[in-house]
Amino acid sequence: MGKNKHLDSHLWQKLMVNYLWENIFKRDAKNRTLTTILSENLLFRKLSKKELKFVENIVHERHYRADEVIFKQGEIGVGMYIIVKGSIDITITDTDPTGKAPTKKVLVTRLISGDFFGEISLVEENGRRSATATAAEDTLLIGFFKPDLLEILERSPATGVKVVFELAEVLGRRLKETTDKITQLRNEIRLLADLQKEKGESGK
Amino acid sequence: MANNKALRREQWLRLAAVIALLLLSFTILIKVENMLVSFLLAFVISYLFNPIVSHFERMGFDRSLCISVLFLISGILIGTIISLVSPLITNQLQNIQSELPKYAEGITSLVAYVEDRLSSTLSSFYDFNLSQESGALFQSWIGSTLSSLPVLAQKTFTTIILAPFFAFFMLRDGRNISRKLLSMVPNNLFEIALSLTHDINEQIGGFIRARLLEALIVGLVVWLGLGIMGFRYATVLAIFAALTNLIPYIGPLIGAIPAFAIALINQDPWLTILIMTSVYAIAQIIDMLFIIPLVVAKIVNLHPVTVVIVIIIGSQVMGILGMIISIPATSALKLTVSTVYNHIVGFRVS
């Protein structure tokens, strides 16, 4: 029974992580430039042209080759990435809690141009990455990190507040979607348990 | 697999390029005359001015304009202060210079007196010959100081011109320069490099501002105290106390030595020496009560033993300058090591 409970919580964790990394803000993405990607991003969509120019000079442009790791599960996260070109695979290392089965990599989701990931690190103190991000092809990313957010807040608080507010909204929406998903899953599990119970009773 | 190898090679090359660039800059700083001091002073100026520039930038002013206006105003301000204070300092320095033989003689006789007392009690153990040695040492020291004065003046002049020049560009382009340098860092080390740069920057900025505030307060208290007492050379002694206060632990002691030497040689009454002691003590108490908490909050906590060892190493490598910069340099090193450790090793545990 205890073991079952353990496995259940492990399953939950996996599903939660899965959901956390899934991009629920997907937009149709084709070839777009760094500036348009930035202006279309949820975090920066409320900024004026001047403010966007200011932010553009603060964020970092990073190029990754196919199969290059952006960050690893368990590392301290410093900030988020926005995909300009290319795609990113989000994977988690699945360790068997009983320690019997070998660890394996599980693909959680593939993110494409316009998507963003890792934004929780912007507000987390020494938070660890809950998954590994790897470039699926040659990829161009915009890196936006905690020191950058602090710089925006220090040099232009009005711009910073807009970004932080949008960030809060994104995190809030993630939380709400996750809660909804949990409720849905709980109902499904209850249904399954009922079904099993019925099956057991009919089997008798 | 081949792709992986190429990737790794590229990462190593990028890292090597960054390290080579940093080493080159460091070598230039060390090897080129006047460069290190000018650069460090420029750092201090830029860290000091940065909060002010950011404040005006927040109000909507252009950053470059803010920096230019700030430099102009502080130039005028410093010029005015120097023109007001310099006659006083020159006067006091001239007095010291004219009375220097007297003090040299005074110190020698003071040493001779101590020696006399010591040898009367310890003669059976050790043969003292301090007065002759210290006399010769003191004479040669004065001689070398006086002869190196023109070179020192020329060096100071170059530094005074170069430091604000560097500071201006550090304030204006510093962020872009560090961004450019960070863009060269390989992807696998980028996040750690970025957060490290930010943390070290914050910490050293806080440290420099707190230390300077400390020196200013100690200088002011000493200046006021000695001034009210009517003690000789109050301004010069206060400036000396403020500057030496930048050296942790032993700095305040060194700062107080000249005043006590002067008082002893002139055979001032005990009351004067007592009041003088309390002036220096009050300066240190104010320092401890108000400033140390500020410094401690801003800097990685170093163990007192580490501090002393590091200061000794600093003094042996770079003299007084080494003593002053050894603490922030060690803190930066400690921060780097702990961050890298947390980033690389820590996650294996979790």
Image: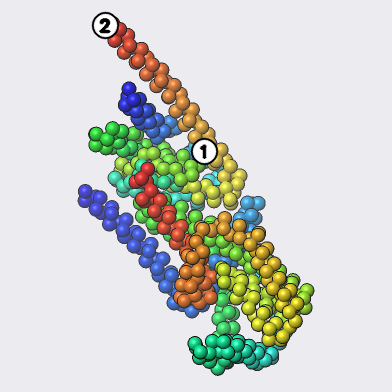
Q: Which mark is residue A40?
A: none
Name the residue located 58 percent from the left edge and 72 percent from the top edge.
B251
Instruction: Give the secondary structure at mark 2.
Output: loop
Where's residue A189, x and y in %?
37, 18
Where's residue B51, x and y in %?
61, 57
In this rendering, position of residue B37 left or right of residue B187: right
Q: How is the image coloured?
A: rainbow
In this rendering, position of residue B315 left or right of residue B291: left
Which one is in front, B94 or B171?
Answer: B94
Marks 1,2: beta carbons within 8 A: no
Q: Chain of mark 1?
A: A
* Above or below: residue A186 compared with residue B53: above
Name the residue located 21 percent from the left edge and 48 percent from the top edge.
B1
Is the same chain shared between marks 1 and 2? yes
Q: Would you name the residue on which mark 2 appears?
A: A204
Q: The N terminus of chain A lies in which quarter of the figure?
A: top left
* Above or below: residue B139 compared with residue B334: below
Q: Between label 1 and label 2, give the one nearer the viewer.
A: 2
Q: Would you name the residue on which mark 1 appears?
A: A167
Instruction: Give the secondary structure at mark 1.
Output: helix
Residue B84 seen in this snapshot: no
Q: Amino acid at mark 1?
A: Leu
* Above or below: residue A186 compared with residue B150: above
Which one is in front, B140 or A61?
Answer: B140
Which one is in front, A110 or B190?
Answer: B190
Where's residue B325, x and y in %?
51, 69
Work out which residue is located at the far left of the displayed protein and give it: B2
Q: Quadrant of residue A185?
A: top left
Mark earlier in primary sequence (1, 2) = 1
